[in-house]
């Protein structure tokens, strides 16, 4: 009969069931282990054996995953399902081989029908320092301390751990929350030429570096801060040039690249 809807015409992705609508963005519906990431393609295994296309809870594009620890730890948004055990994510992800626990999570259900259940937090302080203090209070009240960070116009946002955010405004006086075990090495005495924070005393991963250049009277002429990402690349450089009258500082200029 023309216009009849058959069971074969019904696809799960076209419907939102109760658990999906009730989700607050933290509802885990499937857990497994990421065994490899090759050219952006993630492979997952399940115990007992399962499938990304499982009838009861098929994984769909737009769902979230959370990898709790290891080199690829973080929140990701599923871009597409490639096979029973492989899928891709929207965000960039490093190559990986091993075993990393992963949870598959429904996004906030209300967001799928045009609303978001997440509360809006009003920041009232009109200074950067005060605003970040208020933001800290909001974020640390959450279970994980993550927030969505914009990647740019028309680009998908990504989940970011506020405690480990690598921004100069957070790291100005060195790393604190999120960087337990951080280690600083100072070169030069009594006038240092550099002071570098690392993630640990192994000194394999820099967090922020501060380099000093001096005038002949040992006043600081140039300060350079360099913020590093997890791969060891410089993501922000701040250069401060100072001018003096005799030993007295009269002005300074900062450029950010």
Image (cartoon, grey):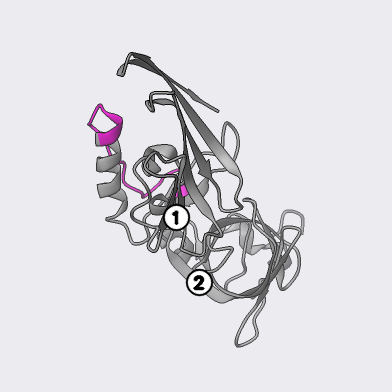
Question: Around disc 1, counting alpha carbons within 10 Å, would you say few (fewer than 14), some (14 to 19), or many (20 or more)?
Answer: many
Element assignment for label 1: loop
Where is residue 32 shown, x and y percent of the image?
Answer: 58, 77
Q: Please determine whether, in this image, residue 132 is positioned above or below residue 229.
A: above
Q: Which residue is mark 2?
A: 29
Picture residue at 38% right of the left edge, 37% below the top: 169
Picture residue at 56% right of the left edge, 57% below the top: 76
Q: Nearer the viewer, residue 50 or 178?
A: 178
**Which circle marks residue 25 in the picture?**
none
Inspect this view and state whether residue 118 appears.
yes
> Which part of the image, by quadrant, shows the C terminus?
top right
- Dominant SS in magenta: loop
Question: Around disc 2, counting alpha carbons within 10 Å, would you say few (fewer than 14), some (14 to 19), or many (20 or more)?
Answer: some
* Range drawn in magenta: 111-129
Compute the Cα span from label 2 to label 1.
Answer: 13 Å
Q: Nearer the viewer, residue 179 or 126?
A: 179
Question: Which mark is first along the chain, 1 or 2?
Answer: 2
In this view, which residue lies farthest toward the front?
216
Q: Are marks 2 and 1 in contact (CB under 8 Å)?
A: no
Where is residue 96 shown, x and y percent of the image?
Answer: 68, 67
Q: Which residue is mark 1?
A: 108
Answer with left or right where residue 179 lies relative to residue 69: left
Answer with left or right where residue 190 lies relative to residue 7: left
Q: Nearer the viewer, residue 80 or 88?
A: 88
Picture residue at 43% right of the left edge, 58% below the top: 25
Say which quarter of the image contains residue 40.
Answer: bottom right
């Amino acid at each position: 009969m023309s216009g009849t809807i058959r069971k074969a015409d019904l696809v799960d992705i076209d419907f939102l069931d109760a658990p999906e609508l009730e989700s607050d963005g933290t509802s885990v519906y499937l857990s497994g282990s990421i065994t490899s990431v090759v050219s952006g393609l993630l492979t997952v295994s399940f115990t007992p054996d399962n499938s990304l296309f499982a009838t009861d809870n098929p994984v769909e594009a737009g769902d979230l995953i959370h990898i709790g620890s290891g080199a690829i730890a973080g929140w990701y948004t599923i871009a597409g399902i490639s096979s029973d055990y492989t899928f891709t994510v929207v965000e960039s992800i490093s190559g990986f081989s091993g075993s990393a626990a992963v949870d598959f999570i429904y996004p906030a259900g209300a967001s799928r029908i045009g609303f978001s259940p997440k509360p809006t937090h009003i920041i009232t302080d009109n200074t950067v320092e005060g605003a970040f203090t208020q933001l800290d209070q909001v974020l640390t009240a959450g279970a994980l301390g993550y927030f969505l960070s914009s990647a740019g116009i028309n680009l998908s946002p990504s989940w970011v751990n506020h405690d480990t955010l690598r921004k100069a405004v957070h790291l100005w006086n060195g790393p604190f929350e999120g960087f337990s075990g951080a280690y600083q090495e100072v070169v030069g005495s009594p006038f240092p030429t550099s002071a570098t924070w690392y993630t640990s005393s192994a000194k394999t991963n820099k967090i922020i570096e501060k380099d000093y250049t001096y005038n002949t009277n040992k006043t600081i002429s140039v300060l350079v801060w360099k913020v590093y990402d997890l791969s060891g690349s410089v993501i922000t450089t701040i250069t401060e040039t100072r001018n003096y009258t005799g030993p007295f500082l009269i002005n300074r200029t900062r450029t950010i690249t």
